[in-house]
Amino acid sequence: GADYYPRLTAVIDSSDKARQLVNEQAEMALLLAGAIILAMISLAPFVIYALYSSEFEPATEVLRWQMLGSIVKLVSWPMGFVVLASGRSGLFVYTQFVWNAVFVLCIYLFLDNLGLLAIGVAFCIAYTVSVFNVWFVAHTLIAIVPARFNVLAATFLIGAGGTVIYLNSISFALSTFVGCTMSAIVAVSSLWKLNSLIDLIGWSRDKLGRKK
């Protein structure tokens, strides 16, 4: 949430508390956004058409690859704030430089063969490289180790997203069906997990009770 950075800054001198907060934030990000991103990968043509027009159809595959990279970003983003909270501006510039360098390099290498798709693929590769780089930097600062759930959840989402992209090369209908099914499963599982963490049912009842 919006209060993540101030909270992290307040506990950054305590490595144990900082590690716990980073992993909790990554877990919440995966639970809240995972199903949405997977659904966007599955329904990319409809998303493009709804937001723009059919003339932007070539951007469909770019969006899919960018969303795949965004799954990796869900894990990378909370760790990236460790650098800022530690006041290490030089390291922050370094992590941003690595991401941009990989992104530009991949576009240069793939543009001739992939055309516009190179942007999406480059985005995904840049975040894949970046998550390991950011983890290395964060590990040197607070000895962070990603929680098992976060690793498994991110791996599943990346695998599911990659499967949808692959299936689309075989059959659009099949990829959409499989993607929407997996998105629904992830959504239900995420809601169940969130309810066990923050009592969503109780929170909803409280909100509804106040409206009445």
Image: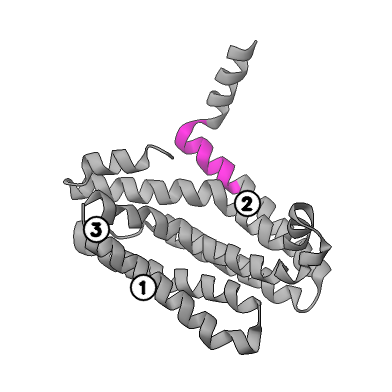
Using residue 188 as the reference point, say whether residue 197 is left or right of it.
Answer: left
Mark with earlier residue (1, 2): 2
Quadrant in the rendering for residue 141: bottom left
Q: Which residue lies furthest to the left in this view?
A: 13
Q: Which amino acid does label 1 sit on?
A: Val
- Element type at mark 1: helix
Residue beneath the point at 74% across and 64% down: 178
Q: Quadrant of the N terminus?
A: top left
- Front: mark 2 or 3: 3
Pointer 2: what residue? 36
Q: What residue type is labelled 2?
A: Ile
Pointer 1: what residue? 98
In this orientation, does residue 156 appear?
no
- Front: mark 1 or 2: 1
Magenta segment main secondary structure: helix
Dot label at residue 89:
3
Using residue 68 as the reference point, say whether residue 59 is left or right of it.
Answer: right
Mark 1 → mark 3, Cα distance in angstroms: 14 Å
Q: Which of 194 and 75 is in front in this view?
A: 75
Mark with earlier residue (2, 3): 2
Q: Residues within 10 Å of mark 1 (few under 14, many from 20)?
A: some
Please provide the residue range marked out in magenta: 189-199
Residue beneath the point at 21% across and 57% down: 88
Q: How crowded is mark 2: few (under 14 residues within 10 Å), some or many (20 or more)?
A: some
Tell me which colouring the rendered structure shows: one colour
